[in-house]
Image (tube, rainbow, N blue to C red):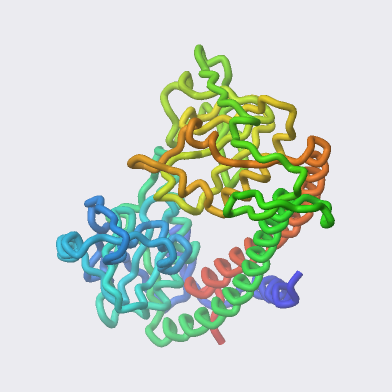
Amino acid sequence: MHSAMKDIGIEWVRQRSYDMRENYDTKIPWIGSIPRGWNFTQLGRICSMITDGTHQTPNYIENGYPFISIKDISSGKIDFSDVKYISEEEHKVLYTHAPVKRGDILFTRIGTLGVFVEVDTDIVFDFFVSVGMLRLKKGVINQHFLLHYLNSPAVGNYIQAIKAGFGTAAPKYNLTDVNHTWIILPPSAKQEKIADFLDAKCSEIDVLSADIQSEIDTLEAYKRSVITEVVTKGLDKNAPMKDSGIEWVGAIPRAWEIHPVYAYFSERKNRNYALQEKNLLSISYGKIIRKDIDTTGGLLPASFSTYNIIEAGDIIIRPTDLQNDKRSLRTGLATEKGIITSAYIDLAPKVKINSSYFHYLLHSYDVQKVFYNMGNGVRQGLNYSEFSKLLVFAPSYKEQNEIVDYLNAMCKETEAIITCKKEQLELLADYKKSVIYEYVTGKKEVV
């Protein structure tokens, strides 16, 4: 464990003994008691503007004005790395609806609820229907104190209570809920003191979290590079090589055979008529996982009769929406019989092969974004006929098994380390929330 994490953990335990100060009960379950001399009000009363953004769905273009959506702020900051753009003409229409200025606070109101982010740039934004915006009245509250408070369990638990009582798969933090959100108001000098303390403390935690995340990213990159190296070059470093003729692959061992996908796989189309199979499967982060077919929430169809029945050893390709989603992993290896949407391509082995080898190979193609140049149509989708012409290659069946054994062991070891580091990140996130909550509600005092 990081030594800094150990120090933080010790501090967290030490802070659990609350200050013995005179408090009074707010009668608000997610806030509890606060020090005497502190007041509380509702968010709507300290804002000059609260809006849920434009309700128009724009036409995106390659370059233009940034259009901020929920995914662009869900990380807790405004992320431009995958932002979409709108034209100047559309910008003029949308800007009159809800111009965003430096100092405004954007928030998520569907999906990942209750993420609040300050606009700290002079770039003019327009934002999607799923993103709200609020503008504070001047001089009412310290904005940094408010941001810490809004992102704390004091508000998060309120939003979770709304979510639990909403009764649908897509609860919303609507404008009425936003207006009625309870806000604590310490004396002005105390607000500033708490904000400064939490700015420094959260910065310390964020630096440590970023360091751990960097280690995770390095491990993920290592795992991808080893997979690509082994499935394209083999385990024998002295094997004679030849040019594969495949641009993203380069040289491969001379003994390996090169063929289109259709030489190894046919398309399995086995519709789930009469609902004979109920083991619902889906692709998630490059793995095929089970889903609850009886759930009342989520984007599930009324009937699963059009779904495909897949078998263990099949490779599933998610070939849809190639132009809009360049982050998701699009391949999965089936390890059990089940059903999956017929929008996916089901590759069924038709010769003696190790499916895991070909899954690793197609995964390496996937992370190199090979599939994105193959799509066509409005949604840039692929069908089996198009995908089956993709050139792949294979060593002998014996070598396929050796490669799979090696990569399975490497992935297991690497993923165990990654899991440990992700647990450290969760611990830090919990600690950060705890510290913020204790200070913004006055249960701990800045000395």
Please give the name of the residue rendered at 37% of the width and 42% of the height, measured from the top-left corner. Answer: 379
Tell me where residue 208 sits by quadrant.
Answer: bottom right
Please give the name of the residue rendered at 75% of the width and 47% of the height, measured from the top-left corner. Answer: 254
Q: Is residue 257 above or below residue 196?
A: above
Q: Quadrant of the C terminus?
A: bottom right
Q: Is residue 31 visible?
A: no
Q: Position of residue 258 (x, y in %)?
A: 66, 40
Position of 173 with respect to 269 (left or right) is left
Position of 280 with respect to 375 (left or right) is right
Tell me where residue 418 sits by quadrant.
Answer: bottom right
Q: Is residue 192 visible?
A: yes
Q: Position of residue 225 (x, y in %)?
A: 68, 58
Q: Is residue 279 above or below residue 141?
A: above
Please give the name of the residue rendered at 72% of the width and 74% of the height, measured from the top-left corner. Answer: 10
Q: Position of residue 408 (x, y in %)?
A: 77, 46
Q: Is residue 79 above or below residue 365?
A: below
Please give the name of the residue rendered at 65% of the width and 31% of the height, measured from the top-left corner. Answer: 264
